[in-house]
Image (cartoon, rainbow, N blue to C red):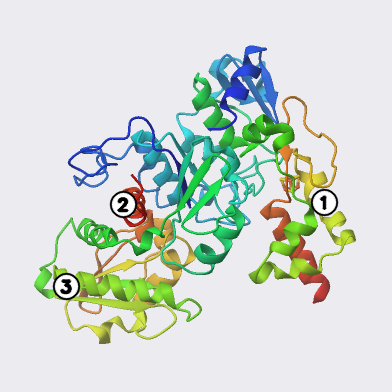
Amino acid sequence: MRGTAWLEARLGEGPQQLGQIWIAGGALRHIDDRDAAEGSLAPLADLAALRETVKTDDGGNFRPLRGAPTLRRGWRSPILAAPALARWLNVLYPGALAFAELGGALPVTPFEETARRQTGMYRLLHAATPEQARRTIEEVCDAGCLRQRLWSGGPARAEGLPLLCPEACNYFVGRCRESLAAARA
Amino acid sequence: MTIIGGPSTKRQKGPFGKFRKPGLFSKGPPHSRIPPSCRAPAPTPPWSSPGTAPPSTPTPAGPTYRHADLLRESGLFAEVHECFWKEEPNFRHVLEGVDAPRVYVVPDFISSGYFTEEVIPRELGLSGPVTRRGEQEIYYCEPVGLHPAMTGVLLERAAEVTAGAPPDPARTALFLIGHGTGLNDNSTKVVYEQAARIRERGPYAECHAAFMEQAPFIKDWRETTALPHVIAVPFFIADGLHSYEDIPVLLGMTENVREHGFRNPHPIGGRTLWYASAIGTDPRIAEVVLAQVENFDARHGVA
Ligand code: SF4
């Protein structure tokens, strides 16, 4: 997986933070559990268990955005070698390691292009104005995502390793469509 | 959809075909060789446990994750990724995370249509069956539902749901249930095709294609067949509203499948009905993904 070598190099420098994750000693846990006793954290056995954990927040609400700062606490991963760590992190923050490794070579897509590409029920986005896009950015990205928007010059919002967003995600596209549809109705 | 980067150095050529490892996905007692993490889901989704709210958007991604996990654990490929339209990881940027120089893309879809023909190629930047992208070659395979191996998966699923007390096949009708909106003729076609294949093989006295929203309607199953035993298998890629709620009602079942799971059989109007979960949840779909990769290699002369 792309990003594995990059991760290994970062871990060679010491423990790291990625979004709400603390990576130390080959294992992952929530950043707020950084100092928790190992025995107080529930061990997650595999990727399937991790997926269940990232699926909902503390209130049991579905987390449509993996970049949302609503990750559950109270768990720990097994001690993993770099390739497996990369796979676990890819469940927590899909694409993050690959995007970070690509760095300047990561293609960035402006919103207009993303909007123009849409078909079917998302064709509505062809009519999105910069103002509507800006409002969705406020509501969706600024209010609920730790990733750094490269496609509209957003600030770095997360501490630690870069958590990049090279293009408006499908959740954003869906929410933008909803507000366009509502404005039409 | 499953993205496979590979093959890995462990790729084997052997009596089971070049991607097969003996015993990996082969037949056996139900799910016996499937790692626990990949077994069929508990019938009750976690969010329906007391005290938790339902998700705002239930997603059908679960089976795809399990098939991908199975393929990962098989070690046949250097990398296995999964990606989705409405859920992360999204289609759009998944290829950026693939290191392997040769990438197979296998849609975990029941048929070809808008998504497999338009959305996936667009989002992944595919220009045809073979796309070159820098150092990478990307091979776009057919959706799992189109592979002839699906026939075997359907029959094994039918055998499994009736395993407790197998009915006399000579007095049993198998129904394959599709959605059938008329929006996508292809999805209707694959249900008919599979039913025809099963009739040719002839393990049951009858096999019918039936649909939720078009004739022949599944709600009319009691008119479609006069046989006393009926097995119904939804030809869907994931369980959800249709397989948990709509189809059971159309079949005349009174049980709450979402709460109680797929318990069988159901006595209905003097007949016996066995009802299976969506075929796409079957762990053997991982084997069909492999079969689509082999199929691609054979059709496009990939060595
Ligand atoms: S588009 Fe916004 S919400 Fe979506 S991943 Fe990027 S920053 Fe997060």
- B299 is higher (above) or lower (below) than B216: above
Note whether B230 is above or below B156 in the view shown.
below
Q: Assign a secondary structure to mark 1.
A: helix
**In what element is the residue under mark 2?**
helix
User: Disc 2 marks which amino acid?
Assistant: Ala
Is tag 3's residue or tag 2's residue first in the polypeptide sequence? 3
**Which residue is denoted by mark 2 in the rendering?**
B291
Q: Nearer the viewer, mark 3 or mark 1?
A: 3
Q: Amino acid at mark 3?
A: Glu
Where residue A171 appears, as percent x and y from the top left, is 68, 54
Label 2 packing within 10 angstroms: few (<14), some (14-19), many (20+) = many
Instruction: Using residue B3 as the reference point, say whether residue B67 is left or right of it.
Output: left
Between residues A25 and B276, which one lies in front from this camera angle?
A25
Rate crowding at label 1 as few (under 14), some (14 to 19) or many (20 or more) other CA atoms within 10 Å.
many
Q: Nearer the viewer, mark 3 or mark 2?
A: 2
**How much space separates mark 3 and mark 1, taking CA atoms?**
56 Å
Instruction: Name the residue that disc number 3 marks.
Output: B200
For disc 2, the chain is B
Tell me the SS state at disc 3: helix
Residue B152: where, in percent of width, then height?
23, 59
Establish whether ligand 1 lies closer than 8 Å to the Cβ of label 1.
Answer: yes
Residue B220 occupies quadrant:
bottom left
Q: Say if mark 3 contacts mark 2, CB within 8 Å.
A: no
Decide if residue A140 is on the left or right side of residue B260. Answer: right
Q: In the rendered view, does A130 fall on the left or right side of B93? A: right
Label disc, if present, on residue A137 of the rendered structure? 1
Q: Tell me which amino acid carries mark 1.
A: Ile
Q: Residue at x 31, y 52 (%)?
A: B291
In terms of depth relative to the viewer, which is nearer, B63 or B164? B63
- Residue at image location 75% in from the left, 58% down from the top: A113
